[in-house]
Image (cartoon, grey):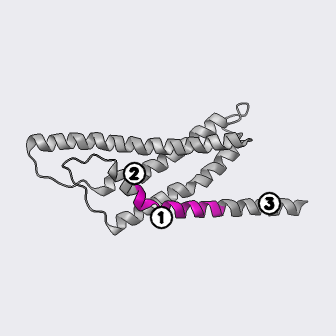
Amino acid sequence: MEGFFVIFTMMRILYYALAIAACFVLGYSLNEFFFRYSKSLLVLGIVPLENRTIQDKDIGAIVLGLAFGLLPLFHLLMVKASKLNTAIKHSLSMALVLTSGLIFWRLRIFGLNTELKQLNDYIASNKLPLTPVAVTDLKFDIYLLMGFLVGALIAILIFRDKSAPLIRN
């Protein structure tokens, strides 16, 4: 019977490793679409954006790949740290993580639009020369990753075992 549990544990490790790899590849390949879509949501006005360099594209792709690749690890962390004993709780916890990531990403776009509007008004009122905004300052993928992390922590706090202490010795 002990051999069964070893095989079962190895299958779970393999499952999570494959899920992490698949999610990383998905995030890595969606980077260009994600950046273009995020950029299309910005109201630039008269302020131009810098062109992206190859290094910016590669770093953004790796960070977005990490953001997506950490989703299975967040799921594993939520399963281990809280009581996710039904499919509905699993679904709700992952929906909470994804929704939190999307909210952080959209709040970043909202904040950038507010700053760009103020910058446009300042440039127009003072008749200053146009300088492009650095693409590295946008950080859409970082905010998505932070949202996923915060969503995982919130899900752990919501679905944790209320009778057990929050911090164990």
**Residue 109 appears at what percent x and percent y?**
36, 44
**Sequence order check, earlier mark of 2 and 1:** 1
Question: The disc labelled 1 sits on which kind of residue?
Answer: Ser
**The disc labelled 2 sits on which kind of residue?**
Phe
Q: Quadrant of the N terminus?
A: bottom right
> Where 2 sits versus 142, above or below?
below
**Is residue 121 among what the camera can see?**
yes
Q: Which residues are magenta?
A: 17-34
Q: CA distance from mark 2 to mark 1?
A: 15 Å
- Residue 61 sits inside the magenta stretch: no
Residue occupying image coordinates x 25% and y 59%? 50
Circle 2 crowding by C-alpha within 10 Å: few under 14, some 14–19, many from 20: many
Could you give the CA–CA distance between mark 3 and mark 2, rounded to whole angstroms? 38 Å
Any magenta on residue 33?
A: yes
Name the residue beneath numbered marker 3.
Answer: 8
| Residue matched to label 1 | 29
Q: Position of residue 99 (x, y in %)?
A: 52, 42
Q: Secondary structure at mark 3?
A: helix
Which residue occupies 20% across, 50% down? 47
Which of 103 and 63 lies nearest the eye of the viewer?
103
Percent from the top left, x then y, of residue 115? 27, 42
Q: Is residue 54 above or below residue 80?
A: below
Residue 68 in the image, given as x and y percentages of width and height: 53, 56
* N-terminal-most mark, 3 or 1: 3
Secondary element at image label 1: helix
Residue type highlighted by circle 3: Phe
Say what secondary structure mark 2 lies in.
helix
The reply to whether dot 3 and dot 1 touch (C-beta < 8 Å) is no
The residue to which callout 2 is attached is 140
